[in-house]
Amino acid sequence: MSPSVGVVIPTRGRRPEQLRAAACAALGQDHPGPVEVVVVVDGGDAAPVVDQLADLLAGGVPGPWERAPVSRSIRVVTNRRSPGLPGTRNTGIAALGTDLVAFCDDDDRWLSGKISSQVAALRAEPGAEFSSCAIEVEYGSRRISRLAGTSTVTRAHLVRSRMAMVHSSTFLFRRGAFWVDESAPNGQNEDWDLALRAAARHPIVHVDRPLVRVRWGGSLYVARWADRIAGLEWMLARHPDLAVDPRGAARVYGQLAFHHAALGRRREASRWAWRAFAARHGEPRAPIALAVAAGLVSAQAVLNALHHRGRGI
């Protein structure tokens, strides 16, 4: 028997067209087991979101899920836990009674075969609890695939590199095995933390095909520099091994340098940039951060250039 899958889509109701596309893509998966979508509204009244999805909630819109041999359902709930993304995700997990739980951000979209491919990968690996897949980054008119080059993601992989393709919208895991840590400052890095904890228990089973389209540039959190600094400092305190691997440490220090530079904090940017150089002489974020701190280029211009190539800082 195919496992039931619950899909948690957090939203603030600000992107109705994208939310609808995310929900339809989840409902339209070819997985032969039941699929239940829970849209969790954070920080506001759920009524507008219910109105946005009224036809889906009523089951009145034809779609691929109508041909599925088992049920498809969708409902809207409000965040009952701490405000922010971690509490919103946990509200969704708590609302589900399915065998597996998946996450999808409201501005992302699953591609055909996402669930079925990951379920098959989990079944093929005894003891596996958590799965991810490659992504297709959409930035403006460009679409760029981000592959991991491996079918197994270990904690060492995630310490050395954040691995953008191990994205929250790719997560599929056994319900009850994991919860999101709600102490993450302003929800920063809660997905990286969850992946690290999952990989520490058992390597993540990765399907290295782009099965999720991730939209970059429209994130509500993309330019919250102080939040990003707090999130990285939280990760360093929570996962001390991030400072052990030279490449991974240099990456984090370089990011901290860049975020401080974006805030105009030249002294802090220089301090973290030199720490990045000390950890790894070839770390590219360090000179970029120093250029931003010196006013030679803006932080947003750097991000725009990187996003155009399907990359982040």
Image (cartoon, rainbow, N blue to C red):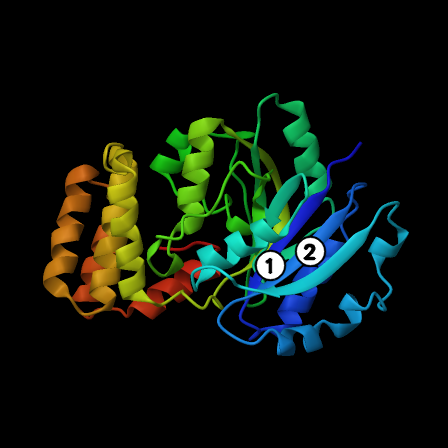
Image-based side of 42 in relation to 289, left or right = right
* Relative vertical location of residue 70 with respect to residue 64 in this rendering, above or below: above
Point out residue 48 in the picture as x, y percentages from the top left corner.
Answer: 63, 78
Point out residue 101 in the picture as x, y percentages from the top left corner.
Answer: 62, 44
Q: Looking at the rendered structure, which numbered label has been put on residue 9?
A: 1
- Residue pictured at 48% horizontal, 44% vertical: 179
Asked if the residue under mark 1 is in contact with the one under mark 2, i.e. CB atoms within 8 Å, the reply is yes
Point out residue 266 in the picture as x, y percentages from the top left corner.
Answer: 13, 64
The local secondary structure at tag 1 comes to strand
- Residue pictured at 29% horizontal, 51% vertical: 232
Please name whichever residue, 175 or 239, is drawn nearer the observer in this view of the structure. Answer: 175
Marker count (numbered): 2
* Relative vertical location of residue 245 with respect to residue 284 in this rendering, above or below: above
Q: Quadrant of residue 83?
A: bottom left
Tag 1: amino acid: Ile
- Residue pictured at 40% horizontal, 58% vertical: 187
Report crowding for label 2: few under 14, some 14 to 19, many 20 or more residues within 10 A (C-alpha).
many
Point out residue 45 in the picture as x, y percentages from the top left corner.
Answer: 56, 76
Tag 2: amino acid: Val
Q: Which residue is mark 2?
A: 37
The local secondary structure at tag 2 comes to strand
